[in-house]
Amino acid sequence: MGKVRVSTGIEIYYERTGSGPTLLLIMGTGLDHSCWNAQLEAYRDEFDCIAFDNRGTGKTSVSGESLTTGSMADDAAALLEALGVSRAHISGLSLGSCIAQELAIRRPDLVETLQLHGTWASAHGYAARKFRAQIQLLESLDLRAFYEINVLWFITPRWMEQHPDRVARQIDTIVAAAPPVEVLKQQYLADLNHDTLDRLDQIQVPTLVTVGSFDVALPPMYSREVAAGISLAELVVFDDGGHLHNIEQPDEFNQVTLEFLRTHAVGDLR
């Protein structure tokens, strides 16, 4: 674990564990690397795992530049280069999945395979209204009040009922690691403005798209649209899963993703 200054001008905090082919894990809006903990435990015996905090989140520094999924993809590419990784498997959730799309399009030389979890290619219709609503809430609420509402989009009712203490701790963790409000708003604007719909065909690596059937943040229609646009994509829908299905259903998520990685991992990609 540590920080590294990258060519895009920021210091990125990352944690690296395990051995084998390199796997880069990119988390979603306002969330830090710890949301991958259940995956790191499962992956590290077979993969060199790098989980990091996006610009302005957690322990990664921030700049005054406006954020886009493209600029954050440049950060991810710069991190791989700073760590001496020439090619990696890439996995992203939510905003992280959009960053991963841009990385695969901008820097195909760095990408061996792609995983896109709870993803979208264009925030049209429902998704656009949701992102605008979240930005409006950020403008009128403090962070804790915002996340008390925001959690309703990414945790399912059943999991919330079964694990009230874990939900409360998760909110505490998210609030502690969240970017400043202005940076978080920029991340939501990046969500809103992300658009790769006409460029998905440029992604020419094996791609796994997953989504929870109960994802009310980005319903399955958006993941289906992404999977349809990538020629080498396969889609897996987790029954009763929410937006953070990697946290709610870690055993099933890890099994599916490890099977995909094992199928396509050949040798040491570092």
Image (cartoon, rainbow, N blue to C red):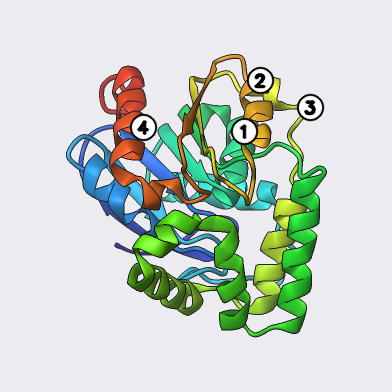
Does the CB distance between marks 4 and 1 fall below 8 Å?
no
Element at label 2:
helix
Q: Which residue is mark 4?
A: 257
Give the label, 3 or 2, closer to the camera: 2
Which is more toward the observer, 223 or 215? 215
Does the CB distance between marks 4 and 3 fall below 8 Å?
no
Of labels 2 and 1, earlier in sequence is 1
The residues bearing labels 2 and 1 have C-alpha atoms spaced at a distance of 9 Å
Element at label 3:
loop
Circle number at residue 102:
none
The residues bearing labels 3 and 2 have C-alpha atoms spaced at a distance of 12 Å
Of labels 4 and 1, earlier in sequence is 1
Query: Which residue type carries mark 4?
Result: Thr
Which is more toward the observer, 223 or 51? 223
Residue 234 vs residue 99: left or right? left
Rendered location of residue 46, percent (x, y): 21, 34
